[in-house]
Image: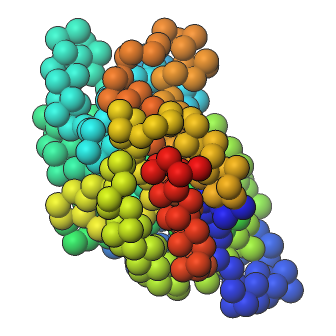
Amino acid sequence: MIPYGKQEINQQDIDAVIDVLKSDFLTQGPKLPAFERALSDYTGAQYAVAVNSATSALHIACLALGLGEGDWLWTSPITFVASANCGLYCRAKVDFVDIDPKTYNLCPVKLEQKLIEAKATGRLPKVVVPVHLCGQPCDMQAIHALAQAYGFKVIEDASHAIGGRYQDKPVGCCEYSDITVFSFHPVKIVTTAEGGAAMTNDAELAQKMALFRSHGVTRDASLMTKEPHGPWYYQQVELGFNYRMTELQAALGISQMGRLDEFTVARHKLAVRYNQELAGLPLVTPYQLDGTYSGLHLYVIRLEEDVIKGSHKAVFEMLRARGIGVNLHYIPVHTQPYYQQMGFDWGDFPEAESYYRQAISLPMFHAMTQVQQDEVIQVLTDILQGEL
Ligand SMILES: *Cc1c(COP(=O)(O)O)cnc(C)c1O
């Protein structure tokens, strides 16, 4: 099976991890701040808080922004469930804004319409989480303007987008957001096995997120509310968690960050070739918003179902049966049983549901060979031209 995604680990990555195993610190040592510096240097954001997953990063980002009971968090229905669940962790309520039919990202026009309605009913969101689906940056300038007008905070879920650019600045610089979150899960662009990070330019948010990462406990006397008892003293000032990233993970991350641009270029080469070779088929290849450079975590096609002979499901099953490890990103979050219990249902976000009926993620990863890509193209062509 040709997988849809796969990590790229070289000898330098392996050596970096082994060095940590032989060192004094397996956790809470010098690699974590060095990894955070690498993330700051790459993106231009002043602060990075690296944690054990993007899910944790989303959670501490929401907490640092003060999201809580009675508040609303809005996100896109086409995302991994974590982009919405982070609101529920904080006991906030979650709602969705339907996607743009071309970019598949949260639509700023629909966002504005929904904000106008929410203002009238006193249900404005405290936090909006735009997701850079497949690595394509959202229209952040438009979202930022709405944040200013309606007073909400913005967390970019850039789990797919490290290495991408918006208006020629790196995704993660937080020019148009309060916080940007990355994922380093193995299937993403750079990996730390499990891992994530929250980027920000706000010193106070960075400090709060660092506290929430580690039990809400501090050894910094300036953060304490009571006098320290002595040099052994630590103080709990918040209810935090253990969301720490290990030194092994941070060392792997540092090593991987050195090859990020190489990874992104390789993905773009594969995408260009897919775009060319699939052009004549009854499907839609990815659209690129002006002024953006995608991180290209995923290459998603949409089938023109009224043209093809089989159904979306049949095409998907045939691809898998012929060894092409396709996938589907994502099942609209509002249709998940857990969210349906809250009152959401099919029909709530029609563009998201239409996307779901047509989308297929094709294999794309750094080490993918031309032979493997030819195989994907050939099998897909055979299936769509009804020659099977
Ligand atoms: C992968 C992913 C997450 C969660 O990342 P983890 O590091 O696995 O917690 C969140 N949001 C999106 C859009 C993702 O793709």
In which image quadrant can residue 337 be found? top right
Residue 259 position within the rendered picture, expressed as x and y whole percent measured from the top left: 52, 84
| Residue for point 56% across, 35% down | 313
Does residue 361 appear anywhere in the picture? yes
Q: For the point 29% across and 47% down, which residue is it?
A: 103
As drawn, 116 above or below 361: above
Looking at the picture, tell me which residue is in the foreground, 179 or 321.
321
Q: Position of residue 334 (x, y in %)?
A: 48, 23
Q: Nearer the viewer, residue 324 or 162?
A: 324
* Left or right of residue 18: residue 267: left
**Looking at the image, residue 254 lies above or below residue 78:** below
Q: Residue at x 32, y 61 (%)?
A: 279
The image quadrant that residue 108 belongs to is: top left
Work out which residue is located at the far right of the displayed protein and give it: 22
The quadrant where residue 372 appears:
bottom right
The picture places residue 10, in percent across and down from the top left corner, at 69, 86
Q: Residue at x 36, y 23 (%)?
A: 349
Q: Looking at the image, which is closer to me, 207 or 119?
A: 119
Please give left or right for residue 174 compared with residue 157 in the image: left
Q: How many marks?
A: 0
| Residue 30 percent location from the top left of the image | 66, 79
